[in-house]
Amino acid sequence: MVLVPSLVNPPYILDLAKNMSLAGYLQQQGHDVWLVDWGHPAPEDAGLGLGGHIEKRLLPLLDSIGAPPILVGYCLGGTLSLAAAQLRRDTAAVAAIAAPWDFDHYPVQSRETIVSLWQKAKPLCEKLGYVPMEVLQSGFWALDTARTIRKYAAFADMEEGSAAEQAFIAVEDWANMGAPLTYAAARDLFELLYEGNLTGKGQWTIGGQPISPAMLQCPALIVRSTTDKIVPADASPKLAEQHDSGLGHVGMIVSKKAPAEIWTLLSQWLSNQGG
């Protein structure tokens, strides 16, 4: 099984710590786990868009495995995994967690804010050839500013050196230490998806092929959060199987309740698919 994280943060949210690792848990349950690390884009990668990450990075990796893969994608990694599963016909199964697809189900103000932030940052990012994490983080904060304030207020009240404080710092390090996104991938994300909703409209193409969850030939599961502001539940793709959770966007992966509510469910589903 191949775990595919988002492009916009380090992959280790799926392997955050010894006692908080989805990848480690799945391995302990007997699954053969591969965790994708998208790496740090080189200057010549500036033109590598979302489709390019699938065609030139993810699909060749799957070819190297030598067996029909099961894909598990988180956040934007889930969106990419669904496309890869369609393009690679021998995919055994695909599961997406908190994956965005139909951007018309985002609040209008949220989409307008994200697109506005991108338009302001675009000229500099185009010159750089990449999008710094600071630009991406400003967009995420804008989706739920009240929560951002609440979480730092709660952090101020945590006991110094406590497990809660260490967990908070680990998650914040993950959120803020990601490699930059290639310029083309950011342009695709903000203009084709957030603004244009090509995925939701069935107009997204990769290598000339239209990409749609309805075209999947393998078992597919979507795990949605009913409290998520980064990826609202209704913005997730419509797949054959669906599980809703009250845990948040990150909480579904690393909260104290995640192992009992999400990890065990995912492991059992993977086992049912032969993974």
Image: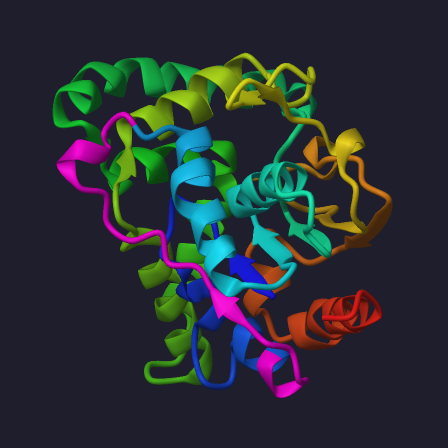
Nearest the viewer among 214 and 161 is: 214
Q: Residue at x 36, y 57 (%)?
A: 10
Q: Is residue 185 above or below residue 8?
A: above
Is residue 141 in view?
no
Is residue 53 in view?
yes
Q: Residue at x 69, y 18 (%)?
A: 202
Q: Position of residue 136 (x, y in %)?
A: 34, 36
Q: Residue at x 55, y 72 (%)?
A: 33
Q: Which residues are magenta?
A: 27-47
Q: Residue at x 39, y 45 (%)?
A: 57
Q: Position of residue 154 (x, y in %)?
A: 46, 62
Please identify the quadrant where the N terminus is shown.
bottom right
Q: Is residue 209 above or below residue 181?
A: above
Residue 102 image-quadrant placement = top right
User: Seen in the image, is 17 located left or right of residue 208?
Assistant: left
Residue 230 image-quadrant placement = top right
Give the main secondary structure, helix, strand or loop, of the magenta stretch. loop
Magenta highlight on residue 233: no
Q: Is residue 30 above or below residue 158?
A: below
Q: Position of residue 265 (x, y in %)?
A: 78, 69
